[in-house]
Image (cartoon, rainbow, N blue to C red):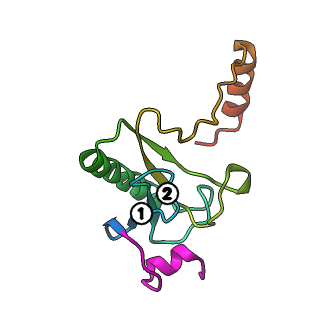
Amino acid sequence: MNDIFSKIVRGELPCHKVAENDQTLAFLDINPAAQGHTLVIPKRFGTDIFDTNPEDLVAVARMVQTVAQLLLQTLKPDGINVLQNSRPASGQVVFYYHVHVIPRWEGDGVFSFWRPNPTDHAAFAALAERLRANNQA
């Protein structure tokens, strides 16, 4: 693969590494939403959550927890956002599976765009039924 994250994994491009193990790499985002904004990626390529190997998803989740703890201990944020975008409509712009771990402080204004959209219970029940009908797990 010739994308930016594959090049980082292969050591062809530099990064500001935060943590690493055999399956994952965590490094600072070069366009951070907040100080300490870190990306966690599997070392094995996957485009998004839909085609990434399940073992890699688990390894990334474990590294996300490690990074969140590092950020909490080091930067003392008031909270942490964990965010993953899959496919363009969600905001994915780098087509290599990755998770954002973003430290948050009260009043920082990051992600102030989210507005609750209440739905009635009948609509929730119908949607839950549709989702259960398609569940192959």
Q: Residue at x 46, y 60 (%)?
A: 39
Q: Residue at x 43, y 79 (%)?
A: 14
- Residue of label 1: 28
Query: Can you give x and y, in whole percent of width and height, for residue 7 in the image?
Result: 51, 81
Query: Can you give x and y, in whole percent of width and height, for residue 71 in the image?
Result: 31, 50
Is 84 placed left or right of 74 in the picture? right
- Quadrant for the C terminus in the image: top right
Which labelled disc corresponds to residue 74?
none
Q: Nearer the viewer, residue 89 or 130?
A: 89
Report the span colored magenta: 1-16
Q: Which three-letter amino acid code belongs to the residue tagged 2?
A: Pro
> Does residue 19 sit above or below 36 in this rendering?
below
Q: Main secondary structure of the magenta part?
A: loop
Circles 2, 1 touching at the beta carbon (< 8 Å): yes
Which image quarter: residue 16?
Answer: bottom left
Q: Residue at x 44, y 71 (%)?
A: 43
- Residue of label 2: 32
Report the residue that reaches farthest toward the top: 121
Q: Which three-letter amino acid code belongs to the residue tagged 1?
A: Leu
Q: Is residue 9 magenta?
A: yes
Q: Tell me the CA gap for discs 2 and 1.
A: 8 Å
Q: Is residue 34 magenta?
A: no
Q: Nearer the viewer, residue 80 or 10?
A: 80
- Quadrant for the N terminus in the image: bottom right
Query: Can you give x and y, in whole percent of width and height, for residue 10 in the image?
Result: 45, 83
Report the residue that reaches farthest toward the bottom: 12
Q: Nearer the viewer, residue 48 or 135?
A: 48
